[in-house]
Amino acid sequence: MDRDVTTSSIVSTWISRASRLALVAAAGFGLAACQDSGDSLRNARAYRPIPDDVVALMQQKDTDSHAPILIRAYKKEAEFEIWKMNAKGDYVHLKTYPMCRWSGQLGPKVKEGDRQVPEGFYTITPGQMNPNSAYYLSFNVGYPNAYDRAHNYTGGAIMVHGDCSSAGCFSMTDQQIAEIYAIAREAFGGGQRGIQFQSMPFRMTAENLAKFRFDPNIKFWKSIKEGSDEFDVTKHETKVAVCSGKYVFGETLDGHVDATAACPSMKPDAELNALVAEKERDDDAKVAELVAKGVKPVRVVYEDGGQNPNFTNHSLPTSRPDAIAAGPVEIPIDAKGKPLPESVQVASAAPSKPETKSPAVKTTAKVETPAANSTQVAAAPAPAPEAKPAEEQAFFQKWLGAKPPAAPAAVDPPIVSVDPAPSDVPRPPKRQAQSHPVKPQASLATPPVVVGSRAVIPEKYSAYAPQDR
């Protein structure tokens, strides 16, 4: 009797537990079914396989899907590179993706809301992958890093994502980010703990260095070029540390490294340092040669970032299409990064009437008639050749270690015409929280103005005039 009661109780308990498990399972199934129209669909995107053609490309490069990767991005060229480690332990270039959109100007990100895409060396970890992104897929690049924090730079949530929309992010198409996300996911699956992300303002070529040699950001750009050069000469991940508020490359540091404190003792890699120094000397010599041939220093100003030319003729939806319609403007600058006197001409956007002469008024200067709906930024006739200024001499002696070349014959600088951006377009609703309205542009219906003894920057670019740092 007691045995029957005990058996009955056990059976009842099992039935009760089975019923509860069935209810939980049913509830879970119902919950999963609800998520199929939401997060689970986005999660499914995160597990798409690497495309077959990319896998085949990996095999050609003597690597595979689980090998470590490294990422390099270039803002000016709007290009995004994936590098893969091969069987020998060297990184080989796998694929370059044209960047669909980036925002801001060339230069590092320094504060929240400046729309700047950061520059420097960052690390992407598995925890920074975001399968539930509102922008198809995304991953955080790791801004601010130790260098940014040491300089009290603010802001965050800087992503590589889809949707071709940027407010400080590296924005790709949905198809591109699905492919890039899958490559990174498989690398983490193979055991990689952190992906190095090198973000550069432009490709560190002699041509770019010659043009931007007096840009206010050149000191910072030269510092991160050292880390870029290390990768170029070794094809191994760059050794990066931050101490004394600066990047330190190619060194093994003993003890704890504090980004704001003095650097601890170092164990230099003599062979590596020699290779980097040799590349720097070669680059400096090429820069000096280009300067001697007359390459002028400029500062490039964007309305709000840019995109790769591959997307110019495509009808992809993008953030602020008005801001990238005209393209960047090159402003000639002096050795202090200031616009050159007597070098900027602002013309009316409205078509000008043919110039007429009046017997009572003498015309002493001719203003070129611009095309309709265009803004001209033109250089005034160059004066007769004269001795190099002290700043130019300092550039050759201190930066390049060379004597300044003889002044080239005077030539008229070219006229650069750009279409003005149309009126501001509201940003996508999902970016409203980060919206930064653009100030209304000044009317372009005023008569042409030829600048005399003082430099003038078009009003819509005045916010980007170089500041003393």
Image (cartoon, rainbow, N blue to C red):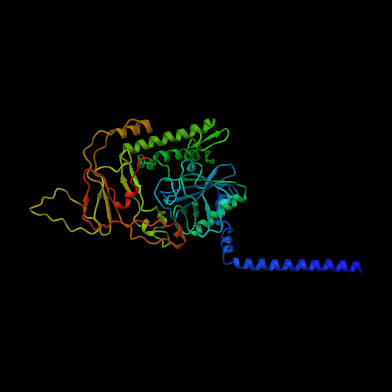
The residue at the point 64 percent across, 68 percent down is 30
Residue at the far right in the pictured view: 1
Q: Residue 393, image x and y in percent?
A: 31, 32
Q: Residue 357, image x and y in percent?
A: 11, 54
The residue at the point 31 percent across, 56 percent down is 441
Name the quadrant containing residue 219: top left
Horizontal arrangement in the rendering, residue 382 relative to residue 179 (left or right)? left
Name the quadrant containing residue 455: top left
The residue at the point 20 percent across, 58 percent down is 352
Residue at the far left in the pictured view: 359
Horizontal arrangement in the rendering, residue 6 relative to residue 27 (left or right)? right
The residue at the point 46 percent across, 33 percent down is 277
Q: Nearer the viewer, residue 287 or 421?
A: 421
Q: Residue 153, image x and y in percent?
A: 46, 45
- Tell me the quadrant of the picture where the N terminus can be found: bottom right
- Tell me the quadrant of the picture where the C terminus can be found: top left
Compared with 142, 285 (above or below) is above
Compared with 255, 176 (above or below) is below
Q: Residue 243, image x and y in percent?
A: 50, 36
Horizontal arrangement in the rendering, residue 7 relative to residue 232 (left or right)? right
